[in-house]
């Protein structure tokens, strides 16, 4: 039996330590991992917990991230609770198996510490890896700080393993800006955290030899489409379980989570839509603009990227005149993902705000409060004009004169 | 909001120092943030670490900072690092050096007219801890200059932060903190 870890009411943890403790408290059966910056400390801390007697499960050191996800998938199919962590190139190497996991409906939990994708090689934070995996059929939960990285990791097990969901879940946090930044974190005690998640519920475990089952069977044009449709439906319908788990977590901790988070949106005229730590920084910028310049700025943060909260987003933006969508990933020849998703949500809305797109923060480039204020001011100009006064897509925080990147 | 920037070499303990300070401050009910710029940090490379302290939750995640305190824990970095970057008029400097304050300022003209304090954290850590780990002495000096906590309170708080270390190391760190507290000028 694993030993109980002594925890203070308030710990000062970085996002990696927070995620590692959530893993420990979940009493995972198998963690298979291959370390990569900046997520390394999650599995490093976890293996230390194991060596110190705080973990009962298996920790499997494998030779690549492809193997890490394969081992998690296999152990999940065998009938156990499984999880791992990765970033960037490691995430890219996992991609093939990510689709296998969601297709086989094995509720793996993957903590992704977001980092840029090479080339050029870069260890710092952006959302390239998150965007690479967004269509893999996983539930995607996004944290904005270390506390949320902890909370959402606990909730990920409960959501993914729910018998009405049975899908793998990613939890995202920003590389370094959250993963290596120590902040106040208020953890649950071990027994409360485990009680919240609950025991793992086996579904068709391969280790039940009295009832043999197959995972990953082949289907061609006869049944493949029906399988994928069913999988998509399960993902879309997971929202009710996600909402229930958020509510239950609020009852336990007082910390309220929503699939779409809104800040000062009640009377906002202009809004930023963003992901990750930028959501909180944008709150600081919005507050300063309201106090000093009278601009009614608000912020919308996506807590759940998949299943995408179209209706909730439409509702959050129902009164604004202009929206700036901020994407922290190289767009690869089109507009940013958030711009596309938000535009789609608003196209069938009664309110038709002016929407523009900013690419920012690639490879860890600092997103400053000043940059964010500038974006709000451009949105305000769009709102006043009732049409675009800026190019549809811009790069914020890029060196050199505006749009000089080519 | 109180903001601090550490100038250090990778391996001298600036990150541990920043996190240790955050730990102590969080115990008083305040909200804290401690982070660093890593890059492809190698032992000995110049680096910076940061602290933010506030009464309410810290939502600002920008790396940009106008520091209230600049803490330089490697003597050479006072010369070669941009220690006055993004300074305010009220920015206070605490610099590790074996030189008297006036001589240091003469050698680094950009420090003229600034509020500068000096303390020899390298010598103190060599004398007490036996290794050039200047982070805990710098915290002792910071306590004196900022008046954040009195010496005894801070030492007790640091004892619990360091509790995983052997008693000998804890005692050496306590001595280092006390010497720097008394010697910073």
Image: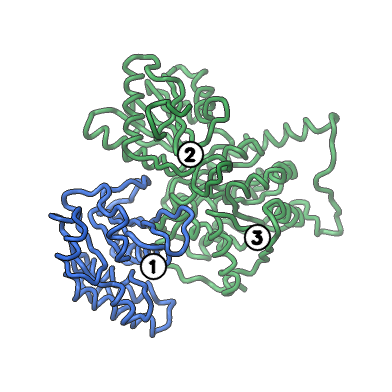
> In the image, residue B105 lies at what x, y percent?
18, 61
Q: Chain of mark 2?
A: A
Q: Chain of mark 3?
A: A
> Which is more toward the observer, A374 or A158?
A374
- Residue placed at 62% from the left, 55% from the top? A84
For the rendered model, the colour scheme is by chain
> Which is more toward the observer, A152 or A164?
A152
> In the image, residue A164 lies at what x, y percent?
66, 43
Disc 3 on helix, strand or loop?
A: strand
Labels 3 and 2 share a subunit: yes
For label 1, the residue is B12
Which-is-in-front pick, marks 3 and 1?
1
For label 3, the residue is A31
Which-is-in-front pick, marks 3 and 2?
2
Residue B88 appears in the picture as rendered: yes
Task: Determine crowd level at label 3: few under 14, some 14-19, many 20+ residues with C-alpha closer than 10 A.
Answer: many
- Residue placed at 64% from the left, 37% from the top? A235
- Residue placed at 39% from the left, 63% from the top? B9
Q: Is residue A345 above or below residue B44?
A: above
| CA gap, disc 3 and disc 1 | 33 Å
- Residue placed at 49% from the left, 21% from the top? A346
Disc 2 on helix, strand or loop?
A: helix
| CA gap, disc 3 and disc 2 | 30 Å
> Which is more toward the observer, B89 or A85?
B89
Which chain gets the blue colouring?
B
| CA gap, disc 1 and disc 2 | 30 Å
Find chain A in the image and tell me its colour. green
């Amino acid at each position: 039996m694993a030993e109980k870890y002594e925890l203070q009411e308030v710990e000062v943890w970085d996002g990696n330590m927070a995620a590692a403790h959530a893993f420990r408290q979940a009493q995972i059966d198998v963690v298979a991992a291959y370390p990569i910056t900046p997520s390394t400390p999650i599995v490093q801390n976890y293996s230390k917990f194991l060596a110190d007697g705080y973990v009962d499960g298996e920790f499997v050191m494998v030779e690549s991230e492809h193997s890490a996800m394969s081992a998690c998938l296999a152990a999940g199919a065998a009938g156990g609770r499984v999880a791992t962590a990765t970033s960037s190139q490691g995430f890219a190497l996992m991609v093939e198996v990510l689709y296998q996991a969601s297709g086989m409906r094995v509720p793996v939990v993957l903590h992704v510490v977001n980092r840029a994708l090479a080339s050029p090689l870069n260890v710092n934070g952006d959302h390239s890896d998150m965007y690479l995996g967004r269509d893999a059929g996983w539930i995607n939960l996004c944290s904005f700080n270390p506390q949320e990285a902890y909370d959402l990791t606990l909730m990920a097990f409960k959501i993914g393993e729910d018998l009405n969901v049975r899908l793998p879940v990613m939890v995202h946090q920003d590389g370094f800006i959250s993963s290596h930044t120590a902040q106040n974190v208020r953890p649950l005690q071990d027994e409360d955290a485990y009680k919240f998640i609950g025991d793992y519920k086996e579904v068709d475990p391969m280790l039940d030899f009295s009832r043999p089952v197959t995972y990953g069977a082949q289907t061609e044009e006869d049944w493949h489409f029906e399988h994928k449709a069913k999988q998509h439906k399960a993902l879309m319908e997971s929202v009710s379980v996600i909402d229930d788990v958020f509510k239950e977590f609020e009852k336990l901790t007082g910390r309220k989570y929503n699939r779409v988070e809104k800040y000062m949106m009640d009377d906002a005229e202009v809004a930023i839509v963003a992901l990750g730590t930028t959501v909180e920084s944008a709150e600081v910028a919005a507050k300063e603009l309201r106090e000093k310049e009278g601009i009614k700025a608000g912020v919308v943060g996506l807590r759940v990227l998949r299943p995408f909260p179209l209706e909730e987003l439409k509702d959050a933006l129902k009164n604004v005149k202009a929206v700036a969508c901020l994407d922290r990933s190289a767009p690869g020849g089109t507009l940013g993902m958030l711009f596309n998703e938000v535009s789609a949500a608003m196209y069938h809305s009664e309110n038709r705000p002016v929407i523009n797109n900013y690419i920012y923060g690639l490879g860890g480039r600092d997103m400053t409060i000043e940059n964010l204020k500038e974006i709000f001011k451009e949105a305000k100009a769009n709102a006043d004009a009732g049409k675009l006064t800026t190019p549809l897509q811009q790069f914020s925080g890029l060196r050199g004169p505006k749009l000089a990147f080519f | 909001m109180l903001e601090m920037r550490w100038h250090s070499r990778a391996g001298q303990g600036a990150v541990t120092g920043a996190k240790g300070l955050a730990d102590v401050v969080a115990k008083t009910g305040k909200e804290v943030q401690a982070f660093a710029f890593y890059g492809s940090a190698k032992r000995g490379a110049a680096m910076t670490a940061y602290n933010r302290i506030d009464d309410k939750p810290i939502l600002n995640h920008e790396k940009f900072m106008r520091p209230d305190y600049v803490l330089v824990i490697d003597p050479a970095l006072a010369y070669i690092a941009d220690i006055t970057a993004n300074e305010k008029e009220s920015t206070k400097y605490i610099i590790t050096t074996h030189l008297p304050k006036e001589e240091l300022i003469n050698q680094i003209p950009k420090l003229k007219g600034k509020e500068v304090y000096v303390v020899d954290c390298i010598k103190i850590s060599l004398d007490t801890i036996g290794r050039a780990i200047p982070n805990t002495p710098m915290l002792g000096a910071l306590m004196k200059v900022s008046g954040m906590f009195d010496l005894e309170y801070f030492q007790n708080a640091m004892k619990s932060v360091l509790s995983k270390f052997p008693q000998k190391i804890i005692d050496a760190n306590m001595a280092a903190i006390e010497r720097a507290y008394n010697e910073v000028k």
